[in-house]
Amino acid sequence: MIDSTVSCSSPPSGQPLSPAVGWYAVTVLCIALLVSYTDRLIINLVVDPIRNDLELTDIEISLLQGAGFAIIFALAGLPCGRLADSVNRRNLIAGGVLLWSAATIGCGLASDFWSFFGARIAVGLGEAALVPAASSLIIDFFSPRRRGTALGLFSLGATFGAGGALLIGGLLLRWIDAGWLIHAPLIGELVPWRQLMVLVGLPGVVLLPFLMSIPEPVRRNSSGLLRFWDVFRRLMADRGTVLRVCLVKGVLAIGDNGLFAWMPTLLQRSYGMTSMEVGSYLALAVSVSGATAAVAGGALSDWFARRWGVETRVVMLLGCYLLTITGASMIFFAGTGQQAALALGVWAFGSIGGYVIGHVVMQESVPSEMRATTIALSLTFIGLIGIGLGPTLVPLVAEHGFGGGNALQPAMGSVGLFAALLAFVVIWPPIRVGLVALKSRAVKP
């Protein structure tokens, strides 16, 4: 039976884990997050080979890319969060990694649409356990002075996973096409896209021993799993700060998914870039800006918390969402592909920085026994609102607002600007409270 609080590898009560252990955990969890994003997004690189080999329609392919993953990822988030608030979080993460890795390999062995769809559902289910449990773990490893930095470093896995999945996949496909795996046991006779799916599923299995070496820290200030009504009351406390941060993540994800989904098409269709140029520019824009935002945003928010108090950390979101407004506005005026990619980089800087800081704000605003649940709720909003609406709104706005599919650029700018402005409105009340606290501390002698 799984221990609900401390694993057998945790030190006795009163003997805190060393900072080195915490940073080791952050490193391993960051790698797990990178692997999860690679396994999630790698399908986008081999759409046509899969469609031709399995004789699928474009609609069926879109279901494998989106709904097959996103729906179960969103719906499983809250149950996984509640589970992470009551069981050994390290073991839950390890189980999720094993599930999604096996499911990714299963995608490579799928014989038809339904077997592929089922494997994608399993990928979403396995990945739904990672972020809530890992965020809760990291919070318990570190003091408030280091939590922003730690969560920022953890988020690098998502940043490099999203930006580098296509580059990693392209490199693997180059090796496959060069015949490096022709004599490999079990997979040597598979077609290239199947070999690719199997290969990207293997790192998660290799990562399992490192995950199992992470000790389960004692939950801080935990009094047992809260009832749903108590969870709701805490979400609504302080003018609904935690609920607003959860909701704003979903709102901003409309812009994230709309821009990320259609920017490659815009650069190819409107600016004549090749696939290699598109991948290089977008990987550079998202990875560099996102990595900088994740680390700098987390560290700067820690400095705010140390200097002005934990309750002022939320003020940092003001700058983040102003950056997303700037990035969305830049899309309207971009005259070259490079300028459009730069606009996406500005957007990503604000969005990813806000994601990291929002994570810390949520975790510090709730007790230990509902931290993973809170993160899971934000992921549910991201899945249902952001992934569900973002990619679809862009072509709808292009068709009905600007007269056709050739109007991708103004449509993307409009969807991004709408999401950024709405996010700003949703998050303004807690920011205003933080500004008042900041001002009161600044005037004190």
Image: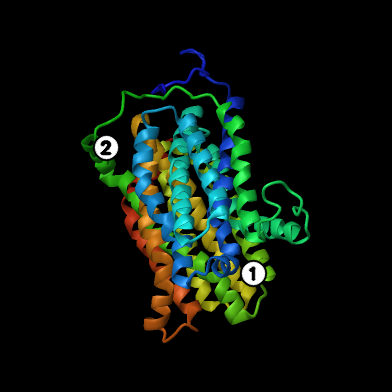
In the rendering, at what x and y percent does residue 293 appear?
A: 56, 51
Amino acid type, mark 1: Val
Which residue shows up at 76% across the image and 51% down it? 183
The residue furthest left is 229
- Would you place residue 271 above or below residue 415 in this image? below
Decide which of tag 1 and tag 2 comes sooner along the chain. Answer: 2
Q: Amino acid at mark 2?
A: Val
Residue 174's spot in the image, x, y percent? 74, 60
The N terminus is located in which quarter?
Answer: top left
Camera-nearest residue between 199 and 73: 199
- Residue 420, compared with residue 27, is above or below; it is below
Rendered residue at 52%/64% (across/down): 260
Is 399 on the left-hand or right-hand side of 288? left
Q: Which label was assigned to residue 278?
A: 1
The image quadrant where one finds the C terminus is: top left
Quarter of the view holding residue 343: bottom right
Residue 431 visible? The answer is: no
Label 1 CA crowd tier, 10 Å (few <14, some 14–19, many 20+): many
What residue would you read off at disc 2?
231
- Separation of marks 1 and 2 at Cα, in angstroms: 44 Å
Q: At numbered mark 1, what does the secondary structure look like: helix, strand or loop?
A: helix
User: Foreground residue, 168 or 16?
Assistant: 168
Front residue (pair 101, 289): 101
Dots 1 and 2: beta carbons under 8 Å? no
Observer-nearest residue: 153 or 277?
277
Say which element carries label 2: helix
Residue ID at (55%, 39%): 149
Q: Badge 2: how crowded within 10 Å, few (<14), some, or many (20+)?
A: some
